[in-house]
Amino acid sequence: MKPTDTQASPVLKVVPVRRYGQWLTTAVLLGLGALAVRSILTNPRFQWDVAFGYFLNAEVLDGLLTTIWLTLVAMAVGIVMGVLMAIGRRSDNPVVSGAAALYIGFFRGTPLLVQLIFWFNLAALYPVLSIGIPFGPTFASGSANVLITPMVAAILGLGLNEGAYMSEIVRAGLQSVDPGQTQAAQALGMRKGQVFRRIVLPQAMRVIIPPTGNETIAMLKTTSLVSVIAIPEILFQVQAIYSRTYEVIPLLITVSLWYLILTTVLTIGQMYLERHFRRGDLRTPQRSFLAVFLARRTEQEQP
Amino acid sequence: MTMVEAVGVHKSYGGNLVVKGIDLTVRKGEVMCLLGPSGSGKSTFLRCINHLEKIDAGTIRVAGELVGYREHRGRLHELKDAEIAERRAGIGMVFQQFNLFPHMTVLQNLTEAPVLVRREKPAAARERAHELLARVGLSDKAGAYPRSLSGGQQQRVAIARALNMRPGLMLFDEPTSALDPELVGEVLDVMRDLAADGMTMIVVTHEIAFAREVADTVTFMDDGVVVESGPPAEVLGNPQHPRTQAFLAKVL
């Protein structure tokens, strides 16, 4: 804002509007907050000592590693499938784009929990899985019960389901890139693959990264679903402990704290990534991480 | 020597015939300006030359070779993506909207294709890029991102980017139409310099003065066909066809 010339006109005091509604809301929220803090500190059933006691428990940490590993692998599968399906959807061949649409429709149209249990019970549908030429010789085959371990079922369930959501994100990103970019790159002699990798995808990333970060954070929490097919991720592990010790609440607090820590770390990582892919964008000049973080907070505070 | 030879080129969009049989020849070193009212098919024809648009009938040869097709037993077979890309690499193109790569610096815009497509050493591509940037008067902008440049500067970078592929032919698709009036001159200066250097150029433009001064041939197109073609003094100074006369009366 430009400084105005105050010398010429008499200086008048500015009286802000009195926001009684806001004062009331603030008072109510502070009151509720105080009640919550008091309850958390004084209610002995929280058993904070137990919750923190299990924080670095070997079984919990084992589960934590499985959760992180599963999140990464499922997201990797999801991103690869998502890019493939997004390219498929854009294909001129109606069979290819139709197949991609069918994939997306199926995996978005059924609950993930159902899909997970389905993969887990695949052996009931196809007892023997084999590799070979259709209607021809078979090269290798094995029992579905052996091949589809709970972990494989979990990765397939989480990853393929994620692929359907990622494909829509990737597609929106690809659509956001000006077709002139492709033409310019083609005119320079680049092949389709080169145009996609070097020109279109990096620009689509600006649009793809933020929702992908959200998907990753959601995936971290969604992995808790695979506890139903006996994958020893963090929720399964604490359930196993509290079924022995009956310390249900403190152990749920332990696991919640770990989820909060991981989602916070991912949020910070996402901020860095977004900054990287904003290169060349004048509207959002590069700032230090702290400045970005603080700016975000003030942007959120001021509607 | 003939650089571009178009014979009976037809192109339609969804049943709508836009280019209706164009024959023209451009010699090596010639500068041809394509004039005509908007919708006359001149930009579409230009984009057919490097196969950004597929033609429906006819042939276009650049340096004696068909760009998008191979002739075999009297038929045109469309080439594979990689083969088309290889032939496009020798034809530079400058767009109305510049189409610089916004996620790359000016220098990267210039070196990307030579390194990726021609497999040049990055150092060699960079060295030439700096020379070209000096030539278009933008030596100080090598590290800048395109969005921080003015339209005229962006278009000059786009010309330098095309030149860094060492093309034998340059296509300009209304290179100054998206520019503020005061920025048109700097781009035309670069093109003038390029023409004086002996580059073969086909320029779709509305800049009549530029066409008169720089072009060897002015080709006037209307409604998908070539109406009149010849030296600027004849076509612009003494147009024979009523449609050319009507167009020039409006723009001059």
Image (cartoon, grey):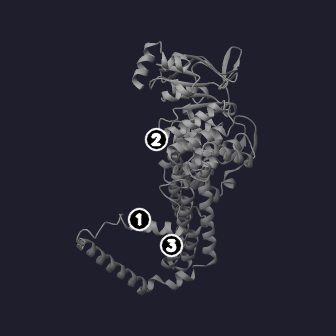
Along the viewing direction, whichever of B182 and A193 lies nearer the viewer? B182
Residue A48: x, y in percent?
49, 83
Tell me which label, 1 or 3, sits earlier in the chain. 3
Given the image, on which type of amino acid does mark 2 rest?
A: Glu
State the separation of the CA atoms marked 3 and 2.
Answer: 62 Å
Residue B42: x, y in percent?
51, 24
Image quadrant where one finds the C terminus of chain A: bottom left
Residue B97: x, y in percent?
51, 39
Residue B16: x, y in percent?
46, 21
Rendered image: mark on residue A256: 3
Along the viewing direction, whichever of B225 and A229 lies nearer the viewer? B225
- Residue drawn at (70%, 20%) of the image: B1
Q: Label 1: state its secondary structure.
A: helix
Q: Say which chain tag 1 marks.
A: A
Image quadrant where one finds the N terminus of chain A: bottom left
Rendered image: mark on residue A253: none
Q: Say which chain tag 3 marks.
A: A
Q: Say which chain tag 2 marks.
A: B
Along the viewing direction, whichever of A92 and A151 lies nearer the viewer? A92
State the separation of the CA atoms marked 1 and 3.
Answer: 28 Å
Q: From where the camera sits, is residue A264 visible? A: yes
Question: Residues at marks 2 and 1, common chain?
Answer: no
Residue tagged by mark 2?
Answer: B182
Question: Residues at marks 3 and 2, common chain?
Answer: no
Image: A136 above or below A252? above
Q: Quadrant of residue A288?
A: bottom right
Tell how many labels.
3
Residue tagged by mark 1?
Answer: A299
Image: A300 above or below B177? below
How many neighbours does mark 1 have within 10 angstroms: few (below 14), some (14-19), or many (20 or more)? few
Q: From where the camera sits, is residue B224 visible? A: no
Which of discs 3 and 2 lies nearer the camera? The answer is: 2
